[in-house]
């Protein structure tokens, strides 16, 4: 999963520091206390790091609560699991897993073989692929190409495998992979296809925001959220869902 520091955490730490240093209208005792706080923070900067980590954890917990509430919305659930534009492996499976991923995400690349093994070994797992572009032009071109494979009825899972396994993924390599998987890359030149594909990718981005997918990979199993390359947690979430189904 992509790692980032939330601006709110930085702002909170900055505010705390500014309050400790501000002396306008303060008594000498207050100013002395502020000076002690300032000196302590300089001597123990790890305290700031710990405060930031605590705030990050609190914000993440709140984000997850909001995401779980969103998962209770029937329309969001439909978009997540039943969008007819998505490719679905094992469509008759009794438990649905949705993955948001990017082909240039290192953690997605590491998880891909395990995802494919899950699909192959467990037909009871209905797996929904969500092309979530976050790593730039090459990722965007690859996502469009995968949707072209879906439209053409090509080997989507094979394309997913090859894109994840590729050392590089520029348009020339993407086109070569499509051809090897029986898909004509010229499909992507069709203005109607381009419009539909880009609309779908924008819809995925909007949906990701609603369900709290701020990075990749991001898995959803029922009302359970698994962030990052945590296949152990994903397996546990699937097992729980299977027992409940």
Image: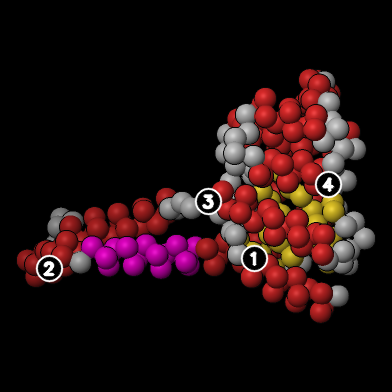
Depth-wise, is mark 2 or mark 3 nearer the camera? 3
State how far apart marks 2 and 3 are (Cα). Answer: 38 Å
Magenta-highlighted residues: 45-59
Depth-wise, is mark 1 or mark 2 nearer the camera? 1
Q: Nearer the viewer, residue 58 or 163?
A: 163
Q: Is residue 98 visible?
A: no
Asked if residue 57 is among those painted magenta in the image, a careful observer would answer yes
**Residue for point 20% across, 67% down:** 44
State how far apart marks 1 and 2 are (Cα). Answer: 47 Å
Residue that numbered label 4 is attached to? 87
Residue that numbered label 2 is attached to? 36
Residue that numbered label 1 is attached to? 231
State how far apart marks 1 and 3 are (Cα). Answer: 16 Å
On residue 75, the disc is none
Quarter containing the C terminus: bottom right
Examine the image and state in which quarter residue 205 appears. top right
Local secondary structure at mark 3: loop
Asked if residue 123 is among those painted magenta in the image, a careful observer would answer no
Depth-wise, is mark 2 or mark 4 nearer the camera? 4
Local secondary structure at mark 4: loop
Depth-wise, is mark 1 or mark 3 nearer the camera? 1
């Amino acid at each position: 999963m992509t790692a980032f520091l939330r601006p709110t955490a930085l702002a909170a730490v900055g505010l705390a520091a500014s309050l400790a240093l501000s002396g306008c209208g303060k008594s000498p005792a207050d100013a002395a206390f502020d000076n002690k706080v300032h000196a302590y923070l300089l001597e123990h900067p790890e305290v700031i790091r710990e405060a930031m980590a605590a705030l990050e954890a609190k914000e993440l917990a709140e984000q997850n609560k909001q995401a779980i509430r969103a998962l209770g919305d029937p329309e969001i659930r439909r978009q997540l699991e039943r969008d007819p534009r998505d490719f679905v492996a094992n469509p008759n499976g009794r438990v649905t897993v949705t993955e948001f991923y990017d082909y240039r995400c290192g953690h997605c690349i590491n998880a891909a073989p395990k995802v494919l093994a899950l699909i192959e070994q467990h037909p009871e797992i209905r797996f929904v692929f969500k092309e979530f572009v976050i790593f730039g032009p090459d990722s965007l071109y690859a996502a469009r190409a995968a949707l072209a494979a879906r439209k053409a009825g090509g080997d989507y899972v094979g394309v997913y495998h090859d894109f994840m396994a590729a050392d590089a993924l520029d348009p020339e390599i993407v086109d070569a992979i499509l051809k090897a998987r029986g898909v004509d890359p010229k499909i992507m030149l069709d203005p109607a296809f381009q419009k539909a594909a880009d609309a779908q990718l924008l819809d995925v981005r909007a949906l990701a925001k609603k369900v709290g997918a701020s990075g990749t990979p991001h898995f959803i199993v029922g009302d359970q959220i698994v962030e990052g390359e945590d296949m152990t947690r994903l397996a546990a979430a699937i097992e729980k869902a299977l027992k409940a189904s």
